[in-house]
Structures are given as structure tokens and as C-alpha cells.
Image (cartoon, rainbow, N blue to C red):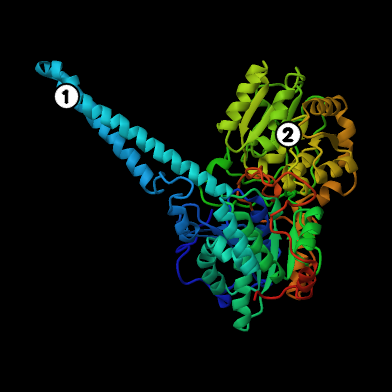
Amino acid sequence: MEFDSGAGTGGTPGAEQRSASGRRGRIVMLVCNGVEGDSRVQKTARSAAAAGWDVVLLGRSPDGRPASWRLGGAQVRLLPVPTPLDRPPRTARRPLLTRPLAYRPATAPYRAQRVKAWRDELRTRRAALAADRRSVPYAAARLAGPRAAARLAQRWVGFRTRQLDRGTALRGTGTPLDRAAVAVWRRARKERCWRRLWPGLYDFELAYGRVVDELRPDLIHAHDFRMLGVGARAKVRAVAAGRPVKLVWDAHEYLPGVRPWQHDVRWLPAHLAHEREYAPCADAAVTVSGTLAALLREAHGLAEEPAVVLNAPEAHAATGPTTTGPTTTGPTTTGPTTTGPITTGAPASGSPPRGRPAPASTGSGAADGGDGRDGVPSLRALCGIGTGTPLVVYSGAAAPQRGLGTMVEALAELPEVHTALVVPRPSAGYLRELRARAAELGAAERLHVLPYVPYRQVVSFLAEADAGAIPLHHWTNHEIALITKFFEYAHARLPLVVSDVRTMAGTTRETGQGEVFRAEDTADYVRAVRAVLAAPQRYRAAYERPGLLEEWTWEAQARTLDRIYARLLHQAAPERPDHQEQPEGDGNADLRGGAREDRAATGRPVRGQGTPGDGRGHRRARGRERQRRGGAVPR
């Protein structure tokens, strides 16, 4: 890690301070997270810098303090983002209409603590009186009244606090007044209604906007829906200053299918309106799957279908000194920061498990499962099993809609099979529930819950398993993307066991790399697992198809992005070898899954596409109008 002095302070370098040698233009990338753990964002910045672009990646500081470091050839800057607009006055009001006895939100914790202090004081006084033998006969009588009053006060405070909690929960799901407000503002302001419904989106503008202007980019790459507005408004200001700027929108997920990040009925309509307002401002769009690309073009009347940039793992990396993010990598890593070549499939133990060939590399720079520096851990050793024991692995976030319950229930029908869950927080409450259920089934010793490893170790770590499972339930965003674990399993040469979510099931059937089962159907999952364990070579043969794994690498996706950048800026893309080595990586976890699929499950049950009231009821005429003015600036 190489920190820049004065990170996040004034004096942001302008265009005249760019590196002069071989730079093709400045790209400013925007993301609303802390960069660490977001492998798609990291790989995008690193590969663009390797292609000769001057890259500055702006992210959100998780602790409110500015920071800066190098990510390969790209500069990363984390900005403090104060969020006062995210807490509008309505959140501080008590629900008078539905719960008139409820406290004000700020009052409840104060009252609760005061009554606890009162009761504690009475306990101390009683102990003091009891210590004085002469006062023992009178201690209980003297304090009986105050103690009864304190108990009554505590019950009253608890009642009023529960009233507040219930009123707040009802407000989040939408009181009639809240729903009426949403309907009125959407009708009155249309796409601009987000300014009233969710003004907190403007907190990002106030934190990022001036910094983007000072950096004077040639192109802005806005990751996902929150940063789209920041990039579009920066484009407006640049055009007004006589400095043309191109905007690329990277849609990581399908917004109408996202479960709101906050429990508030205004969240989804506001963010949908924000996306509809600024999507036409993008000069080009990219996304994570062909299915999502078609949905975005239809929803926003885009002039052309977004390019598909898969969330594929890197084939290899440079062997130079690593320059990573902050030294505190957080809970997403379990081992040391990787510094050596990335591995693309060799098992962590250095030799293939019995009965299975070692997965082959997809890139010329691939190495074996550990070079003495990165020390890829052994999945089987962590599970305490040998190479002859059948092992099914799942990597990613843990949530009920991820289908992990199906894997645990199946252990009763698969007495010889072990299951490994590689998750960000092994101690989470949901995982404790899964362990308890496995114990009830008599399979506790065959369920292994393990933490993430650094993302450059992922493929080699997973390669010791016999099959990779993706048991997702039917949610909108589960249906439309090929998530990162799909590609990680493929590069580890694992037969797949995939639920019948549309895009992944269709790809798996087409390639023949695994079995598809009915989502939430334990018996059918058991059938699929038995099939892949009985004839693993049949499914691994799919990976021998010429060019398949080479196309499923980040290097191939990066070439697509580079062509888009060059086209927008009227440049010829430089000739580069197919296996050009990338700058050193950052060692953060990549077991998040693509399209942010490891975030707590997003989406809604699929009924066609979208649901009533999701804000997608725009007219076709409006879509045609936007198609005519593609790449425009906002009104």
C-alpha cells in the first residue's frame, strides 16, 4: 500500500498535473462504497490504468476520514460523506396518528436510561440500609413505595417505546399518509420527485461534486445507480465550462428488483426516479449480463443496448510488489495480502484431490496454489477431511434467499457428503441457525462454515471441492445475472449444482458444466448433487471447450471497457497482447459475487419483470423521446 501525503485535502491536481508519458486521458470512477471488497470496481480501475488511462477512483470513506492509496496504476481516494439529508425531519416525528402515546424518537432512549438509573439507585440505597443492622427492619418498608413507582415507570417507558417502534415499522412499510405523499410527488415532479422523496441522494453530490470538477476528467465512469446522478451533473458543469466530458454508466444490478437498503416506502420510488432522470445522460452503458442489458434498454429507451462486462475473475496478475488498499482489510480476508501471481485453479494443497485432475490455468501467468508468499489455505484441511471425501462448496453471502437452508436439509439424504459454506461472517445469526439445524439432522460434523480468503486465492481455494453450489431462490436480480461465484467455480473446474434461476440455469444447460435443480426443492437438489458426484468428468469436460474460460476472464472484459473508452474519446485502442500482465492487486476478498450479489439478497419475487408500483410505468412515447436524445444532459 502506498499512501499519498495529504490525501483527501485541498489542492486536487488538475489536468495540467497529469502524468505526461503515454497517458490517453483522465478517467474518474465513482462508487458509493469504500472500494475494499468490491472486486468489480477494483478490477475496472486497475485494468484501465494498465491500458494507459490516468485513473482516479473516488469512493466513500467508511469512517468519515479521507484516505488515498494506489491500486496498481490507479489512484484511490476515499471521501467523507456527511449524510444529514438522509435523516429528514419526518424521521424525528412521533407517529401521532397511529400511536399517539409513542415517544419522540430522540426521547425514548433517554427515558429508558433514566428509569434504569433510578432503579439502580434504589438497589444501592437498599444495600446501604441493609448494611446498617439497626436499619434492617425498616429498609424494606422505607423503599417499598419508591421501588413500586420505579417499576411502574419502567413499564410505562417500555410501553411508550414499543409504541414508537411499532409506529416506525408501520411508517417504513407505508402509512396511508406516506403512500399518498409518494403518489403526489411522483405525479407532480415525475423523475425529479426523488429530491423530495429521498433528498439523501444529494449528500453524495455535495461530497463528490467539487472533487470531480477539480479533477477535470475526460470521462466519468459511474458505478451503479447512486453515482449515476453525480456523474451526470458533473458532465453538465463540464459542458457549461466548455470542456466536453463523456459519461459511462455501469449498472451492477436491476434497480426495480432491489430490496430497499432502508426500510422506507419512499426509498425505491425515489431511486427509480433518480435513475430514470439521469440514465439518458449516459454516453454509454455497461452491465453484468445480456438479460439485464435488454431490460435496461427497454426501461430507459436507450439508443443502444448496454455492453456486457461479466464479473469474471482475473486470469493472472503481475508479480511485482503489491500496492493494496489500507492495511486494515476488514473482515473480508482471512490470510495475508497476496503478492505473488494469481492462481486460476490449482488446488491449495499443491496437488489435485484424489480422483480429480488439477484445474488448468486460463492465463499464461498462472501459478500453482501457493508460491511461498501468498500461502493459499487448504479448503479440505480447514474442513478436517481428506481428498476422498465428497465435498460441496458454497461461497458468498449468507441469507435465507441464497438457498443455504436447502443445502443443510440435504445433508440428511447425503450421508457421505460434506458441505462447506465460505461466507463473510461465519458467526452471523443465520449461520448459527443453520448449524443448529444440521445438529438436529445429525450432520453437524459435515457442515463447515469458513471465512472469506483474499480474492486472489479464491479459485485455488475452491478447487479442492468436488462441486460448487448456487442454490438461489427466485428473486428478480437472481434471475438476470451470471454472478461472480459462477465464474470462480468454472475456473476452479468444479461441476455446478445450480437452481433454476433463469440466466445461470440456461448457461449451465448450454455448456453442460453442471446440473440444474428446482429452487427450494431439497429432493431435486439431492438428485443434482448425486449426479455430479457420480460422473464429475462428464461436467468438467465442458471447460475444455476452446475459448470458454478465456472469455470468462476479467482480461477479456477489460478489453470491452477499453474499446468503449476509446470510442467515446475518439481514440484508437492500443494493440495489446491477449495475456498482458496486470498491475499488482490489493488482496481484498472477491467472494462477494458479481452484480453485488453477496449483498443481503436483493430483488423481489419474479412475476414477469418488476411488480406493480415499482415506478416502471413510463410510457413508450417517453422511451422513444429518450432514445432520440441519448447522451443528453439533464434538464
Q: What is the three-letter code of the residue carrying label 1? A: Arg
For label 1, the residue is 142
User: Can residue 494 be seen in the rendering of this structure?
Assistant: no
Q: What is the three-letter code of the residue carrying label 2? A: Pro
Vertically, is 413 above or below 515? above
For label 2, the residue is 347
Helix, strand or loop under label 1: helix
Residue 601 horizontal/vertical position (percent):
66, 43
Mark 1 or mark 2: whose residue is earlier in sequence: 1
Residue 263 horizontal/vertical position (percent):
56, 48
Residue 309 horizontal/vertical position (percent):
76, 56
Q: Farthest residue toward the bottom?
A: 242
Vertically, is 615 above or below 547? below
Using the image, tell me which numbered label, if any, was put on residue 2: none
Contact flag, marks 1 and 2 (Cβ < 8 Å): no
Helix, strand or loop under label 2: loop
User: What's the residue at 70%, 58% (across, down)?
Assistant: 251
User: What's the residue at 29%, 39% (across, down)?
Assistant: 114
Mark 1 vs mark 2, CA separation in Å: 74 Å
Q: Nearer the viewer, residue 337 or 569?
A: 569
